[in-house]
Amino acid sequence: MKRIVCLLLALLMLSTVFVACDDKEPATTSGDAVSTSADATAETTDPKETLDIPLTADYEEYEFNILSAGNQVWNDFDFEEESSLPLDNAQYKRKIKVEEDYNVKITQTSKKSYSSGNGPGYQAVNKQVGSGDCDYDLCIIAGYDVSVLAYTGRLYDLASIDAISLEKSWWDENATNSLTIKGVTFFTTGEMTVSDNRAAFCLMFNKELLANYNLESPYDLVTDGEWTIENFGKLVKSVSEDLNQDGMYTKDDRYGLLVWDDSIVGMVNAAGQRCCTINSETGELELTFYNESTLSALEQYSQIAYDKQYAFQYQRVAESTGRTMWKANQGLFFTTLVDFLPEFREMEADFGVLPYPKLSETQDNYYSTIAPFNSNFVCVPLIQDDVERTGVIAEALSYYGQQIVTPALYDVTLIGQSTRDEESEPMLQIIFDNLVYDIGYYYQVGPYNKQLIYKLRAYDNNFTSMYDTYKTSANSLLKVINTYYAKAVQDWTND
């Protein structure tokens, strides 16, 4: 832990000369704005809300640079022509719409590389702030990197940008509420990017196997509020076949559950719990991982995922093994990401999509985790040539993302082509409406997310011992984070 804290302190002390307060003043928007009374274009749906920014402006062919960087890079803006693929075509139309309305040229720079706090996103923005050059107007950066940028004072407070209205529906309210500290929002997400929806945890189930084994539909359980870990486990332990009859359970056999390592992390959030939350009184991050609900969820899930007759941890063989087994009807349930749904559109057996189960029927909602490793968040580097222009383009991209891109992702790419039943639509709606952004995972506190995965791999259910082992180091790291976050927030609130 001393090495981790020293590394964090070293990062924090780099480029200690911060930008002066005057640099945070929004620059005057170039070009003449026109009335906002114009209607949305024909390819958009009727908006429930309207933009509170000019619908057109002349930014004199400014090259608006967007950086996308992290463990997973999502191609949201790098389209130069129409496509036969619905989602790609919608993203192209959104880009052209904003370029024409504001006379800008939007470019995307992608840097896909390992990101764990000092990855390409952190390095690029840290360099920009240190040099004083505006290389990127807007960024969509890995959660592990953007969190470090936030508390080291390298990002603009999104709530301070007049053109950005975080209360609008094209910004994710769950993300903003979970990530805003002391009234300052250094990063969030929304309809600007498809990364949040595509990085969401989900469960898939094989409808053919469900029928063959005469099992109850999990759709009914979800609708009735009875989709719990207990009922999930009963269905899992209804399917087990030694297909090659060799007396052993291997990748060649059939199981009730194909287990993704990260699924154990999702089960904590699915139970309504968080690794860390923001204290409403102090505004500081605090450890909230260990409680009866978390332990109950972990213990119940371990009884399911650790049973080698009914569950198979496919990543111990190869990353692609789970998807191969799923396509071959070797699993009733498959823990995965929404992003993988399109890969199974050619699968012969019909399948359905589900949120993760509740801990108990008394729980209000079903919750779905945004994968920490795959996550990306919208942020604005502290150095800006014209922050008001950045805000206008960011708001327009988000608004037209909701109107043009999201319907293509949701109705065509997912509902129309990937899933094959009407029940999948409300299930995806439940998932997307209740996304969990666990700030403790992004700040790698513990790091309990990795320790949970290690426990699953070892078939070890001694979670109390694991928590106690890392509790002191977790709280030490939180103290460092809270100290530097307070300084970063103070720089804004004192202006």
Image (spheres, rainbow, N blue to C red):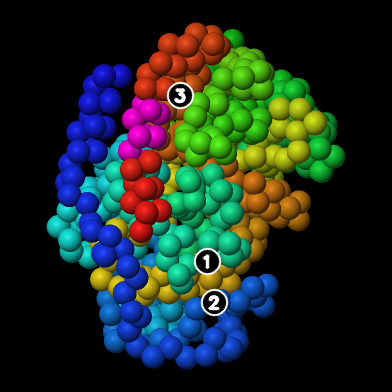
- Which residue lies at the image location 37% right of the left edge and 48% below the top edge? 490
**Which is more toward the observer, 299 or 85?**
299
Specify few, some or many for label 2: CA neighbours under 10 Å numbering under 14, 14-19, or 20 or more: some
Specify few, some or many for label 1: CA neighbours under 10 Å numbering under 14, 14-19, or 20 or more: some
Mark nearest the camera among 2 and 3 is 2
Residue kind at label 1, given as amino acid type: Ser
Q: Position of residue 77 (x, y in %)?
A: 39, 67
Magenta part, dominant SS: helix
Q: Position of residue 356 (x, y in %)?
A: 65, 36
Query: Which residue is under mark 3?
Result: 448
Query: How far apart are the alpha carbons under marks 2 and 3?
Result: 41 Å
- Which residue lies at the image location 42% right of the left edge and 22% below the top edge? 475
- Which residue lies at the image location 51% right of the left edge and 23% below the top edge? 313
Residue kind at label 2, given as amino acid type: Asp
Q: Which residues are magenta?
A: 477-485
Query: Which residue is under mark 2?
Result: 52
Image marks 1 and 3: residues in contact by CB distance under 8 Å: no
Image marks 1 and 2: residues in contact by CB distance under 8 Å: yes
Residue kind at label 3, given as amino acid type: Tyr
In this view, 107 is above or below 70 = below
Image marks 2 and 3: residues in contact by CB distance under 8 Å: no
Query: Which of the marked residues, 2 or 3, is nearer the chain's N terminus?
Result: 2
Query: Which residue is under mark 1?
Result: 165
